Each structure stands twice: as C-alpha cells, then as structure tokens.
Image (spheres, helix red, strand yellow):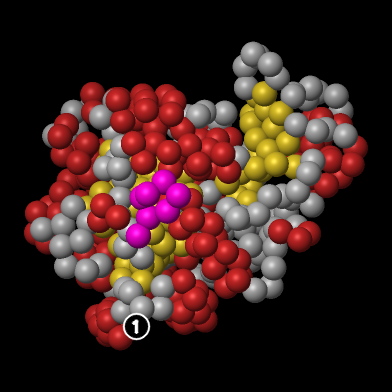
Amino acid sequence: MKLANNSHLAYCTNIHRGSSWAETLESLDQYTLRVRERVCPEDPYAIGLRLSASAARELSVPSNLLAFRKWLDERDCYVFTINGFPYGDFHGTRVKEDVYRPDWTTPERLEYTKLLFDLLCEIAPEGMEASISTVPGSFKRFITSQDQLVAMRENLSKGAEYIERLSEKTGRDLHLGLEPEPLCLFETSSETADFMDNLLAAELADRDLLLRRLGVNYDACHLAVEYESAEESLGRLIDRGIRISKIHLSSALKVSDFSKATLKMLEGFCEPVYLHQVVARKGSEALVRYEDLEVALQARREGEDTADEWRIHFHIPLHQSPGSPLDSTSDHISSVLDILKSKPGICRHFEMETYTWEVLPGGLGTSDVVDQLVREYDWTLGEFASRGIGR
C-alpha cells in the first residue's frame, strides 16, 4: 500500500511456497488477495513479490506475462519490489546455506537478477521507483580466494550497468539492495560499507552509477543480531553515501536466560529448513558466532559457550512476543522507524518479512497465515501512524 512521502509497504510473498510460477500465482490467489481484502480493500494494494529463478523464467513467457499484468490490473494490485535473494526452493526442503547459492561470484546470479529487473519493468506501474533485494555477495566460508572477490565485483558492476540502462530506457529509478546477513561475506554495517568502498575502488564502473543502482536492503533482524543499534548501522551507511534500497521490517529471537528449561525451549527452534545463525556476546569481549542454533546449543551444553546473551537469526512475528524467558529485537524496528520520522527520505520501500510461519514452534505459529499477516499489518501501520509517517 502507498504510504506518505511516496513510500510503499507490502509483506514479502517469500513466506508462501512458490518454486514455479503456477505455484506462486496460486499463493497470490489463495493468501495475498485474502489479506488485501482485510487490510486494503479500497485502495491499490502493493505486493512484495518473490520469484525463484524457475518461476521468473516461466513468467517471462509472453502469454504468462500478459496474463499476470491483466491479473494485477483487474485486482487493483501493483508490484514495486521483488525479493531476488533465494534463487531456488525456499520452503518444505533443506535450504540452510544453499540459500546463498548461486552467489555473486557466478554468472547465474547475475543473469537471474537481470531477468528479475526485466520482469519488474514489465509489471510495476509506469514510472514507479522499483527495487530488488539480493544476497550479500556470498556466505563467508564460501569465499576462499581473491579471484572470487574479483569475479563478484565484476558481476555486480555489470549488474549495475544493466540496471542503469534499463532505468534510462524506462524512465524509472531502479536499484538493487544487497542484504547484509549474519555470517555472510558482509554482515555488519561496517563490513558492508567496506565492501562498497572496495567495489568503488575497483573502478569497474562509474562511481556515481554504482551508488545510484546498488544499495543496501536493510533487514532489521539481521543488524539487530549483530548487536548494532539502528542509529549506528543506518547512520554509518548513510554517512558513507550508500543508498538504503529497501527496509525489511523483521525481528530476531533474543535470549539471556540459559537455564536448562530455556535451552530445552530453544530446541523447538531447531528445524531442518533454514539456517539460524547465532551471535553471542559476553560483556565487552569479542562477539562469538555460530553457524546454526544447534551448534550454539551444543557449545552451551558442553561449557564452551559462556555468553550473557544470544541473538538468533530466527524471524519472529512482528506483533507477537516469543514469551518469557525468550525475547525479540522488536526495539530495533522501533528505532528504525524513529529515524525515518526524523529523516523521511532515506528509504521509500518497506517489506514485512516473517517467512518462518511454517517452522515456528508452539503458539507462535498458526495454520491461518492470513490472520497472522493481518495482525502484522495492524502492528506495522500502527507503528508508522504513531510517528506520523503512515498512510
């Protein structure tokens, strides 16, 4: 939906299954339209679309593309952003570290992203600013040579030049947001800024072009897991001249009670589909990182981990606390919105991205995801309105 200052809010449809285009469209019919009826029945409704590589190729067939444009027009819906992070399957099978493959060292990632921009220019309203989010280069342990970093910079530069040509051709402001995430090539705001500096220093494309077309998809969950404040992380990126392409409104799991009962409770968040990175902190000591929650739990039980607090990359519903003794990082979202109130022009694209409904334990999940999404909209719109930055 359209907000003040020509901004837009949607929920990201990566929360639904959609390996093929047919499955993606079925999810839009089955879930998205029902949400729309309850939160935005009268006005044009924004969709944050997720397209796998196979779904994107299928949608690019002219007859499918024409039919989808008609679908959008008839239902008064519009697409302003696409989640281009997961290339393949994202539900119902092991995803884990494979979500970062293929990464930006490969031509496959470049071609997939170019296709997404081609499609976005076909389905987004004429003249509308449009964005795509993508992986933060790669997963850290995948990068073992300088040659990979060189290839990554070359591919991103080629991507930026392609986006620039499309922008000039269509008269749109198009941009790609690299999404920092725990244990990825760049996960903190400092690493992100340094990566962009190194990309600019490589002089593979015009500096101003790169800064126009490449930015950051700021995921509130991810930066909170790194123990960064919104003021610190957003401030650093903005001060370094990096575009905030899109903001993901998302919340991470937080724990500072490590009793046996709590550790047992955390076992319910260990599941086989997604990677749940853990960043542990003890006083002023250096942060300790674990690739998955199961690894952190094992280290705790064996006495190797003595942290005072864990931040866990497990997306928690925006409107709901995980319940004591667990906590969430929703305060980070509040701080982001406070900054937006004082600096309303820093970003115009917003997505709610709780993609974990299928794997949430206990009372956090529900069989009726539509109800949950409506509650997330209510919470988010309330937070925007309380700061005078809503609809």
Q: Which residue position is annotated with label 1? A: 75
In the rendered view of the protein, which quadrant contains the N terminus? bottom left
Q: Main secondary structure of the magenta part?
A: loop
Tell me if residue 110 can be seen: no
Magenta residue check for 390: yes
Q: Between residues 79 and 374, which one lies in front from this camera angle?
A: 374
Image label count? 1
Left or right relative to 210: residue 261: right
Residue 66 position within the rendered picture, expressed as x and y whole percent measured from the top left = 25, 82
Q: Residue at x 60, y 50 (%)?
A: 315
- When the figure is inspected, residue 112 is found, relative to residue 202, above or below; the finding is below
Q: Mark 1 packing: few (<14 Cα in 10 Å), some, or many (20+)?
A: few
In the rendered view of the protein, which quadrant contains the C terminus? bottom left
Q: Which residues are magenta?
A: 385-391
Q: Residue at x 41, y 46 (%)?
A: 387
- When the figure is inspected, residue 195 is found, relative to residue 116, above or below; the finding is above
Q: Quadrant of residue 128?
A: bottom left
Residue 176 position within the rendered picture, expressed as x and y whole percent measured from the top left = 30, 48
Left or right relative to 357: residue 234: left
